[in-house]
């Protein structure tokens, strides 16, 4: 069974640096003001940083909405 934990956005080491605005608009369609309404990014912890395998755009979106964790 996967292990889940809350991650601080400040502890993310991005693996994607250009995020198309239309991707953020698609994410917004599922957002209800709560970070749990967005599918959690998948990745791993390495030396205190979260390295996303997927979910960079979701992390950027949540950060733009003022969230400090996911």
Image (cartoon, grey):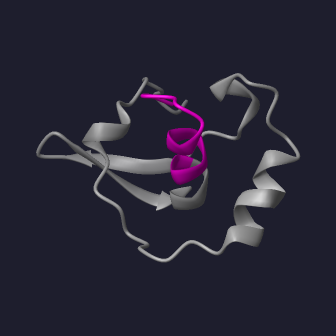
Taking 56 as reference, is 36 left or right? right
Give the quarter of the image for residue 36: top right
Residue found 64% across the figure and 75% down from its top = 20
Residue 4 is one of the magenta-drawn residues: no
Quarter containing the N terminus: top right
Q: Is residue 9 above or below residue 3?
A: below
Return the x and y of residue 12 as percentages of the image width and height: 32, 48
Residue found at the far right of this picture: 29
Q: Is residue 42 above or below residue 69?
A: below
Taking 25 as reference, is 66 left or right? left
Residue found 71% across the figure and 59% down from its top = 24
Q: Is residue 37 above or below residue 50?
A: above
Return the x and y of residue 25 as percentages of the image width and height: 79, 58
Residue found 70% across the figure and 22% down from its top = 34
Report the magenta residues as a range.
Answer: 59-70
Residue found 44% across the figure and 28% down from its top = 69
Return the x and y of residue 47 as percentages of the image width and height: 11, 45
């Amino acid at each position: 069974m996967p292990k889940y934990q809350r991650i601080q956005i400040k502890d993310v080491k991005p693996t994607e640096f250009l995020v198309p605005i239309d991707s953020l608009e698609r994410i917004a369609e599922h957002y209800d003001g709560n970070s749990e309404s967005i599918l959690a990014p998948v990745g791993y912890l390495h030396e205190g940083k979260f390295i996303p395998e997927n979910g960079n755009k979701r992390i950027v979106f949540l950060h733009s909405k003022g969230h400090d964790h996911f």
